[in-house]
Amino acid sequence: MSVNSALARLRAFDSSRLDFLFQKMSSLKVVVIGDYFLDKYLDLDPALDEISLETGKTAHQVVGISHFPGAAGNVAANVAALGVRDVRAVGFRGEDGEGWELEADLLSMGVDASGLFVWSGRRTPTYLKPRDLRQIGLAGEGDRIDFKNRDRTPRALEELLIGRIEAGLGEPDVLLVTDQVDDESAGVVTPFVRNAILDLAKRRRGTLVAMADSRKRILDFGGLILKMNSREFSAIDRMDSLTSPDEVLEAAELGRAVAVLEARAGSAVFVTAGRRGAWIGGAEPSLVPGLAIEGAIDSTGAGDSFAAASALALASGASFAEAALVGCLASSETVRILGRTGVPTRAGMQSALGQWRAQRQ
């Protein structure tokens, strides 16, 4: 249960091995099902602030707007960015401007959005992020404004989603599930939809790499590979007195707890830990160390990058240790992209691997 055991398994992992996995990824068929959000940034220029004559309050002036797929959309964007040519989105969006922007963004990235059902009466979930254009990164972001569906997903929409799942989703090689919303009845992955996903994964066991990422209900996805961060893991394992990811990771029982969780869920588990890397289970739970990064970082979307890259690596023949490293390399590039929902590149990950190997010497 150590870093050394993971490093021993990764001693031969070099740029040629990473390139081999990249080449394999290109031919995969990937479906991303879940809650498709839009991350929308409003650039504000404080020098142009006005005082409202009606209210006396500050009227902030928007001088730029940018938007990117978020949540399941960002997972799909990561898959496409890593060179996968067949990426399919399954979920829903609203009949609204944000939904149009979300679909346009996905299409521009090469994602097939024909499975993103447009549903009147549902809004496109959106994270609206005002930011001071004079301050780069998280320091310039103001309070976020969220648009979410808070009523139950219509049964007719659930049946459309379930029908698509039961039809096999086009026989993909990889299925990535993103369960983003707090209320399971209001999103894409409702209990009925989740059961259909679990049934599909059971039918395709051995031929499908299926991974779930759920903020609130990760243990409900037993049978799929479970990806979570260290805070989510600590909540599951009732280690709530440990408040920081580093404290969780340095708990002596963590490796054993990962193994216990795998046995409990009947699934392989990845526990990401930011700059520290990622824990993997198996016969010898180990910490795959991450890349030490200097300078400012923005963790937005890092977990999505890890999920996409690690699942693609597994489907391309990587071991779990190798897949965890590939996920860490993808995340290490994403966090260095400030002020937007970033995605990795193959070239950037090759560069990160060189840095990672240098740091191990």
Image: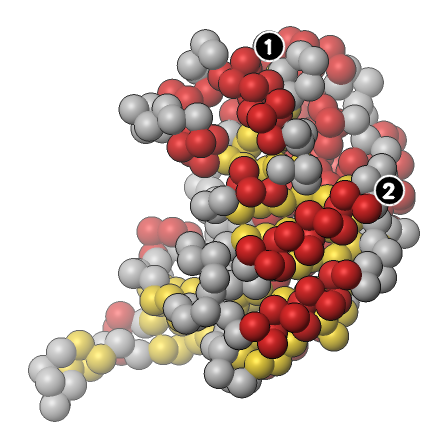
Q: Residue at x 85, y 62 (%)?
A: 170
Label 1: which secondary element: loop
Q: Quadrant of residue 31?
A: bottom right
Q: Quadrant of residue 168?
A: bottom right
144 displayed left or right of 103: left
Q: Residue at x 51, y 70 (%)?
A: 153
Measure the alpha-carbon separation of dots 1 and 2.
29 Å
Residue closer to the observer: 78 or 193: 193
Q: Nearer the viewer, mark 1 or mark 2?
A: 2
The residue to which callout 1 is attached is 1
Q: Position of residue 134 (x, y in %)?
A: 35, 62
Residue closer to the observer: 349 or 244: 244
Q: Position of residue 77 (x, y in %)?
A: 67, 59
Q: Residue at x 22, y 80 (%)?
A: 59
Colour mapping used in the image = secondary structure
Q: Position of residue 303 (x, y in %)?
A: 56, 43
- Looking at the image, residue 74 lies above or below residue 312: below
| Three-letter amino acid code at the position of disc 2 | Thr
Residue closer to the observer: 311 or 330: 311
Numbered tag placed on residue 207 in the rendering: 2
144 displayed left or right of 88: left
Q: Position of residue 86 (x, y in %)?
A: 83, 60
Label 2: which secondary element: loop
Q: Residue at x 51, y 63 (%)?
A: 187
